Image: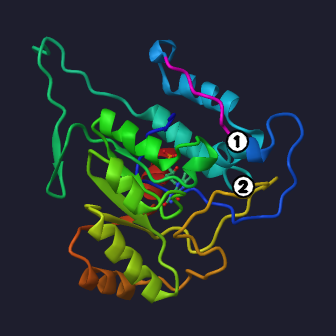
Amino acid sequence: MLQAIVALTGTAALPLNSDAKHQSGRLPLADTLFTDGPDNLDEFLSLSDFEKKAEQLMSKTVWEFVSSGAPDEITLRWNREAFNKIKIQTHVLKDVAKIDTKVTLLGQELAYPILIAPSAYHKTMHPEGEIATAKGAGLAAATYVVSSFTTTPIEEIAKVATQPTWFQLYIYDDRAFAKDLIQKVEFNGCKALCITVDAPVFGVRNGEKFKLPDGINAPYRFATQDRKRLTWKDIEWIKSITKVPILLKGILALLMRKMLSRQE
Ligand SMILES: Cc1cc2nc3c(=O)[nH]c(=O)nc-3n(C[C@H](O)[C@H](O)[C@H](O)COP(=O)(O)O)c2cc1C
């Protein structure tokens, strides 16, 4: 599966299930990416090569969901600009015959410091959905952060995962639901919980057309439930009911401060 590797930074605003009419032109939503992906990856050099191919393979509606941001897409552009500004400091005349990119993070050894960020609804993008992502993560020795909006139950992902998984959580006001889910993912081997803290409401999007096709479910999504009441107290509570490390996903204050100071 073509899965972009994204950092655990700001959380994209996800649209709720909306009643949508199918777009004309490309495949209708129900026929989402049921075309086989390319077998040969030699033609792919950069992330944008993957992006172009993914666009060809997905229905227009799913592609819009994957690639668009909230209204004017300003922060989407900022993210891209910030990513493009990352520079790699080179150290010349070093023996690089053997390189080692291993790091230890929260007691877990990673082959390299890149995780697969949580993203929703993989079965709309590929028939195998999160199973394919987990297999891909295994082949790439990457840690896969499973989204709360997974379209595959965590038990099934756990069966195929050969690398550690983490789980991303939206905390709804129904705390019993949260507790059950935390226990379930822990039982299924998730090694850390990423609590998304920057999405108390869904962002609106222009031309929002997205709707889960019939036959694809997101078992841990509450489409109508509120999640506006999350505070530090809840983080304390989550700490008290889990043994695995907790990460807060979506803290932007430092990033914003840095960006603003660069503009001065
Ligand atoms: C299609 C898509 C779906 C996403 N779904 C989720 C999600 O279910 N939960 C979540 O916490 N973040 C979700 N995100 C946000 C990503 O995890 C990440 O934080 C965000 O894309 C910012 O990183 P980037 O600038 O590298 O894309 C999603 C992002 C995209 C593009």
The mark that comes first in sequence, 1 or 2, is 1
Three-letter code for the amino acid on which mark 2 is drawn: Pro
Say what secondary structure mark 1 lies in: loop
Q: Is residue 206 magenta?
A: no
Measure the alpha-carbon separation of dots 1 and 2. Answer: 9 Å
State the image coordinates of residue 66 (x, y, percent, origin top left).
63, 45
Give the extent of the magenta segment. 32-39
Residue drawn 19% across and 32% down? 101
State the image coordinates of residue 253 (x, y, percent, origin top left).
44, 63
Q: Give the overall secondary structure of the magenta segment.
A: loop
Q: Which residue is mark 1?
A: 32
Queried on whether the Cβ of the residue with tag 1 lies below 8 angstroms from ligand 1, the answer reads no
Residue drawn 44% across and 54% down? 9
Residue drawn 32% across and 41% down? 114
Cβ atoms at labels 1 and 2 below 8 Å apart:
yes
Say what secondary structure mark 2 lies in: loop
Residue 202, picture quadrant: bottom right
Residue 200, picture quadrant: bottom right
Q: Is residue 34 magenta?
A: yes
Residue 241, picture quadrant: bottom left
Q: Which residue is mark 2?
A: 213
